[in-house]
Image (cartoon, rainbow, N blue to C red):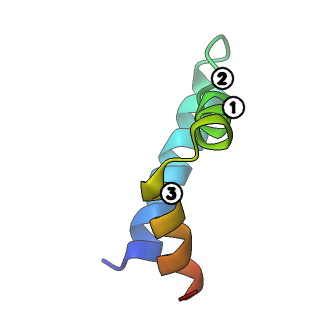
Amino acid sequence: MTRKTALLLALSVLAILDALIPFVPLLALLLLYVVMERPAWFLALVREVYGSE
């Protein structure tokens, strides 16, 4: 399984959970974390997915 496929699968699972549990906005919380904290793993993931060097 490639990294892109694993990312797509993980995001799909998060979207399903987000739809099934209406009181806890999981994707919004994840987005806020990424925007506010700017974790290194997210930058590495974006570079790997989009091929930026």
Q: Position of residue 2 (x, y in %)?
A: 35, 79
What's the residue type where badge 3 is placed? Answer: Phe
Secondary structure at numbered mark 3 = helix
Disc sitting over residue 42 in the figure: 3
Q: Residues within 10 Å of mark 2 (few under 14, many from 20)?
A: some
Q: Which residue is mark 2?
A: 25
Distance between the Cα atoms at labels 2 and 3?
20 Å
Structural distance between the alpha carbons of marks 1 and 2: 5 Å
Counting from the top left corner in percent of width and height, residue 32 is at 67, 33
Where 10 sits versus 2, above or below?
A: above
Residue 29 rendering spot, x and y as whole percentages: 62, 28
Which residue does the image show at 66% across and 23% down from the upper left? 25
Q: Amino acid at mark 2?
A: Pro
Going by the image, does 42 lie left or right of 1?
Answer: right
Q: Crowding near pointer 3: few (<14 within 10 Å), some, many (20+)?
A: few
**Rendered location of residue 52, percent (x, y):** 58, 86
